[in-house]
């Protein structure tokens, strides 16, 4: 999850008031010009002192005395009150800087919570933590968006993601995608949105899948999946035939008396490999195994031990030379 960078509020307050070194001044000018978000924080800081026009940082000239005079007037210590204030002007400047820093922190906390956060995954697969400690694993060309406050536990998904949701008593977790929603209390499930359909696969737990614009809904539990077709807005559910479709997210492969040909086909698709073998050689071979968090080479070695397999590797090609289960 991408969080905003930490800001030295006291240093920024001193910069706004013109009470920093030339080196620090150049540093803050570079920071302000680095992004639109930084400039907005700077401009919000100025507004806390008094309304000012939007000007370029490069053209701004800092008048230290004038700046601190404005700050002193804001907290009720204008020069016109008494000359006895002058010996404490240094103390007042530090007090004003701390006051301004406090105001900035309060203001920024409020504004940061009142905004949306988007996590964008352009390629590959990566796991992110959400504010409630639930996790989302995003595949390439996918994104999730949610409120920074996250008080409603609502997220909007584009693309494909695997969610592992922690339970919070009395608070559901809802994923919106297209014109459908998935509501849960605590579970692990995958949502895949495409132009033609929305697919939800539940690893464990219980979810409700429904359409936003009508009353169609269905409950899905362990190893069940639901499918919404976009064109006819139809919702169907069924038992999950192959749990290995979640491998990209949970890194788990389960085989129960699967033919070796079926295993090879799936490994080719998942890992981008090519198996070369004569079908007669593996016709009698079946595999029952569970692989968790194993690389392709490890999986292949374990299969070889299980069915007395011999093979040769050349790049992404695996040639089966012998299978002992004939």
Image (cartoon, grey):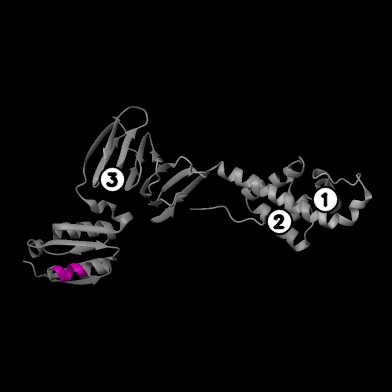
Asked whether residue 75 is drawn in magenta, I would say no
Is most of the magenta stretch helix, strand or loop? Answer: helix
Q: Badge 1 local density, few (<14 within 10 Å), some, or many (20+)?
A: many
Residue tagged by mark 3?
A: 201
Residue visible at 65% across and 44% down? 107
C-alpha separation, residue under disc 3 versus residue under disc 1: 61 Å
Q: Is residue 59 left or right of residue 102?
A: right
Instruction: Choose the circle earlier in sequence order: 3 or 1.
Output: 1
Q: Is the residue 233 above or below the residue 39 in the image?
A: above
Residue 125, quarter of picture: bottom left
In the image, 319 versus 39, the foreground residue is 39
* Residue 197, visible in the rendered structure: no
C-alpha separation, residue under disc 3 versus residue under disc 2: 49 Å
C-alpha separation, residue under disc 1 versus residue under disc 2: 15 Å
Question: From the viewer's perspective, is the residue at label 3 or at label 1 nearer?
Answer: 1
Residue visible at 31% across and 41% down? 207
Instruction: Choose the circle earlier in sequence order: 1 or 2.
Output: 2
User: In which quadrant of the rendered image does the C terminus lie?
Assistant: bottom left
Res 10 label: 2
Q: Is the residue 317 above or below the residue 129 in the image?
A: below
Instruction: Residue 87 in the image: state x and y as whole percent.
Output: 90, 57
Specify the segment rendered in magenta. Answer: 302-306
Residue visible at 27% across and 38% down? 219
Residue tagged by mark 1?
A: 68
Q: Element at badge 1?
A: helix
Instruction: Choose the circle earlier in sequence order: 3 or 2.
Output: 2
């Amino acid at each position: 999850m991408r969080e905003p960078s930490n800001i030295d509020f006291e240093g920024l307050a001193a910069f706004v008031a013109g009470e920093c070194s030339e080196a620090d001044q150049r540093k803050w000018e570079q920071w302000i010009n680095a992004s639109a978000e930084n400039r907005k924080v700077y401009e919000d800081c100025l507004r806390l002192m008094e309304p000012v026009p939007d000007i370029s940082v490069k053209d701004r000239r800092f008048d230290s005395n004038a700046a601190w005079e404005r700050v002193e007037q804001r907290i009720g210590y204008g020069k016109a009150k008494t000359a006895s204030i002058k010996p404490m002007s240094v103390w007042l400047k530090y007090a004003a800087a701390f006051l301004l820093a406090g105001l900035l922190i309060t203001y920024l906390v409020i504004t940061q919570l009142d905004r949306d956060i988007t996590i964008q995954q352009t390629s590959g697969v990566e796991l992110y933590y959400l504010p409630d400690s639930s996790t989302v694993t995003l595949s390439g060309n996918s994104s999730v968006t949610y409120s920074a406050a996250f008080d409603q536990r609502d997220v909007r998904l584009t693309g494909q993601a695997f969610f592992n949701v922690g339970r919070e008593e009395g608070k559901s977790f809802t994923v919106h995608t297209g014109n459908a929603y998935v509501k849960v209390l605590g579970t692990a499930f995958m949502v895949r949105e495409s132009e033609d359909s929305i697919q939800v696969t539940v690893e464990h737990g219980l979810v409700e899948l429904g359409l936003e614009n009508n009353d169609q809904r269905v409950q899905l539990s362990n190893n069940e999946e639901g499918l919404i077709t976009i064109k006819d807005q139809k919702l169907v559910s069924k038992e999950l035939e192959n749990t290995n479709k979640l491998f990209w997210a949970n890194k788990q492969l389960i085989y129960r008396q699967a033919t070796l040909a079926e295993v090879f086909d799936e490994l080719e698709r998942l890992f981008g490999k090519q198996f070369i073998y004569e079908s007669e050689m593996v016709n009698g071979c079946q595999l029952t195994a569970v692989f968790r968090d194993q690389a392709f080479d490890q999986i292949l070695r374990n299969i070889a031990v299980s069915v007395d397999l011999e093979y040769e590797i050349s790049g992404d090609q695996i040639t089966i030379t012998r299978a002992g289960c004939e």
